Image: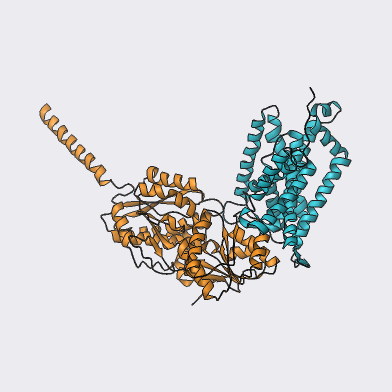
Chain colours: A orange, B cyan
């Protein structure tokens, strides 16, 4: 009686060992099971620029919830987890470490601020985790990277577009006012390269800090140089200070902004001087407005899923980025792995999100997916309008 | 350009001067730098915004209300972060005010910030800027300078000519001797903190329409106020005022005539030079301790 029992026990043990041995092999990809894919978000969820993180994450979550409602991707439902980097470098590294090692995510859909995304880059690359950027724009986040992809227009694309816009508007004397930090530098350098390539020498190049409360000297110098166009490489606060002082001195140049100045309604509210934005044009990462009829389904989804939030341009950044993630996961097929997803992303092309200005195309040696930008201005009715060619 | 830079430097400098003055009032009474002083400035700005924009009161009412609240913040700081540690080391006092600064910032984030862009304080006067020859000055700049100078004069009168001022001076000079002559030292200490933070509050309400409000705005201003106080001579009330105005003007002239990238650095270079040549600052006195 003992022998058969021992044989049974041995067999059971063998089966258990076999299953136990196989189990790690099946679950070799962290965050991936037969019925789920875990995706990690990181970005600012709190603080002055929480919109680039929390609101974009809300948008991305809408896409994933929609996908889950359809049955998931190849039978796998998407599960998301969020980490706050507070738009700080150390926060970016900590958030990514937590996502990879603690939450064991399969991939990352994150990066709202450029600086923490740049700081976290090495961690992502070292752990070979595929990452699709939410809305950070510094080229360095994905340039030369293997595992990181930026679906939206990057800083160099924006800088080149600013110069082209100035030329297109017939600007004769161009001034550059830029913010002297890592974010500003990531835009300033490609901007100056593009100006050199176009044979344009700016009549004034002035610096401001993100905390500056007075722009008298900068405005007077730019005005004295006779600049008819100002390429604005500043965050909203210094931009507001510059514009207020410009109005004071009766200086009304053509302003050419970038994606940090996308919310023109809010910018006008902060400048608080009627007509101050009359000649202000800025780049948008998206080609449709929040009031566009095509956005109705997203507006309804927002009301349902995030009643305390509303559809905003930042939500749309997240929606667009998540659509690229979904396209890549679908194309990668049911036998998913991190390596396979990376390979798929490297050649993913013609993904029309309906939000980014043009279809997204990645190349193995160029992980910047968008080369086109949209231009916006504040209409007479106080609503954001798109510049139509 | 020169006159406009000077005008702008005076306006900014008057804000630095008021904040530095409050810092030094407290320093003279306690020999402690209040590291939560910038947060008093920030809170007063937000309180003014709440009263003026949120509740729709007049700018004058917002000014008075916010300054009164700032004074209460100062008194509370003395009660919560200074008095319980008065017999502790200076390090404990510094840490206590630093901790309070973080706490106040957190409160401000919870109440007014932390969820989006900076809070704009609408311009109080919509009249066009005043033009005299090349000089262009906005009405708000005139109000800032005028209000700051008036506040300094009122403070000087209070400090020199009133009984309260004399008691504050006596307490700052020698607490034990002040107590011996019947001054209620603890009460005067509380009031001194209240007056000190209220001065920062005046600066905040005057400057609010020129800037944007955000919970972390106190830190950079505290550094400038501290620099102004050092430049003038730590402990000198007049020195803090002169230091503040000098700082504002140097910032503007550097940005205008040297390089805008050096505007932030120049005042501190100036301080290093002044302290190397005159370690006690411009108006600081040598303290002689008789054994």
Please tell me whether residue A101 is drawn above or below residue A37 in the rendered image: above
What residue lies at 45% left-to-right and 65% top-to-bottom? Answer: A157
Q: Residue B273, percent across and down?
A: 69, 44
- Position of residue A77 measured from the top left corner of the image (x, y, whole percent): 34, 54
Direction from residue B74 to residue A355 in the image, left or right: left
Left or right relative to B101: residue A258: left
Does residue A14 sit above or below A109 in this rendering? above
Which residue shows up at 25% across the image and 54% down it?
A335
Say which residue appears at 72% left-offset and 36% top-offset: B78
Against A235, residue B74 (above or below) is: above
Q: Give the left or right position of residue B188, taking residue A289 as reference.
A: right
Q: Which quadrant of the view contains residue B164? A: top right
Q: Is residue A299 visible?
A: no
Give the percent coordinates (x, y) of residue A372.
44, 69
The one of A153 and B2 positioned closer to us in this rendering = B2
Q: Is residue A80 left or right of residue B79?
A: left
Observer-nearest residue: A125 or B50? A125
Does any portion of residue A9 appear in the rendered image? Answer: yes
Quarter occupied by the N terminus of chain A? top left
> Outermost residue, front direction?
B277
């Amino acid at each position: 009686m003992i022998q058969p029992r021992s044989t049974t026990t041995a067999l059971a043990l063998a089966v258990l060992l076999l299953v136990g041995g196989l189990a790690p092999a099946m679950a070799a990809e962290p965050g991936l099971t037969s019925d789920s894919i875990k995706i990690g978000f990181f970005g600012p969820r709190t603080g002055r620029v929480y919109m680039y993180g929390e609101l974009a994450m809300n948008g991305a979550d809408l896409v994933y919830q929609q996908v889950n409602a359809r049955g998931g991707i190849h039978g796998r439902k998407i599960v998301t987890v969020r980490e706050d980097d507070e738009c700080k470098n150390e926060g970016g590294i900590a958030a990514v470490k937590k996502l990879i090692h603690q939450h064991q995510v399969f991939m990352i859909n994150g990066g709202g601020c450029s600086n923490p995304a740049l700081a976290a880059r090495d961690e992502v690359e070292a752990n070979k985790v595929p990452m699709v950027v939410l809305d950070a724009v510094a080229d360095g986040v994905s340039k030369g990277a293997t595992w990181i992809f930026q679906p939206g227009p990057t800083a160099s694309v924006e800088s080149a577009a600013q110069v082209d816009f100035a030329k297109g508007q017939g600007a004769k004397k161009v001034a550059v006012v830029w913010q002297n930090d890592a974010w500003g530098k990531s835009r300033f350098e490609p901007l100056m390269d593009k100006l050199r390539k176009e044979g344009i020498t700016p009549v004034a190049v002035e610096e401001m800090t993100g905390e500056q409360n007075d722009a008298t000297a900068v405005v007077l110098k730019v005005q004295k140089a006779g600049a008819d166009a100002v390429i604005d490489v500043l965050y909203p606060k210094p931009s507001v200070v510059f514009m207020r002082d410009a109005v004071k001195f009766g200086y009304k140049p053509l302003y050419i902004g970038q994606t940090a100045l996308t919310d023109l309604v809010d910018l006008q509210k902060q400048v608080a001087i009627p007509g101050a934005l009359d000649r202000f044009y800025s780049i948008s990462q998206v080609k449709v407005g929040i009031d566009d009829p095509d956005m109705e389904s997203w507006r309804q989804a927002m009301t349902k899923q995030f009643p305390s939030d509303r559809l905003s341009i930042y939500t749309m950044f997240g929606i667009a980025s998540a659509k690229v993630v979904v396209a890549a996961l679908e194309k990668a097929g049911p036998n998913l792995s991190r390596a396979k997803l990376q390979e798929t992303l490297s050649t993913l092309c013609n993904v029309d999100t309906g939000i980014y200005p043009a279809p997204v195309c990645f190349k193995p040696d160029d992980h910047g997916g968008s080369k086109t930008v949209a231009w916006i201005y504040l209409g007479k009715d106080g609503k954001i309008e798109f510049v139509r060619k | 350009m020169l006159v406009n830079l000077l005008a702008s430097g005076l306006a900014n400098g008057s804000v630095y001067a008021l904040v530095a003055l409050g810092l030094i009032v407290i320093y003279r009474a306690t020999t402690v730098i209040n590291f939560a002083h910038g947060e008093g400035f920030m809170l007063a700005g937000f309180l003014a915004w709440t009263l003026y924009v949120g509740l729709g009161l007049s700018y004058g009412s917002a000014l008075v209300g916010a300054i009164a609240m700032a004074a209460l913040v100062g008194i509370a700081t003395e009660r919560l972060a200074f008095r319980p540690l008065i017999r502790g080391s200076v390090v404990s006092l510094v840490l206590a005010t630093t901790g309070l600064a973080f706490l106040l910032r957190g409160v401000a984030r919870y109440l007014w910030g932390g969820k989006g862009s900076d809070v704009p304080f609408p311009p109080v006067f919509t009249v066009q800027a005043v033009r005299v020859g090349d000089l262009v000055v906005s009405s708000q700049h005139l109000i800032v300078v005028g209000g700051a100078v008036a506040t300094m004069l009122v403070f000087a009168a209070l400090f020199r000519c009133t009984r309260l001022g004399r008691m504050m001076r006596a307490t700052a000079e020698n607490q034990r001797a002040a107590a011996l002559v019947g001054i209620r030292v603890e009460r005067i200490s509380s009031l001194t903190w209240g007056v000190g933070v209220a001065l920062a509050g005046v600066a905040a309400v005057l400057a609010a329409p020129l800037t944007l409000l955000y919970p972390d705005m106190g830190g950079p201003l505290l550094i400038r106020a501290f620099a102004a106080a050092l430049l003038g001579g730590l402990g000198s009330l007049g020195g803090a005022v002169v230091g503040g105005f000098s700082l504002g003007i140097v910032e503007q002239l550097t940005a205008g005539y040297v390089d805008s990238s050096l505007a932030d650095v120049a005042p501190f270079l100036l301080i290093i030079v002044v302290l190397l040549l005159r370690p006690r600052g411009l108006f600081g006195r040598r303290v002689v301790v008789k054994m």
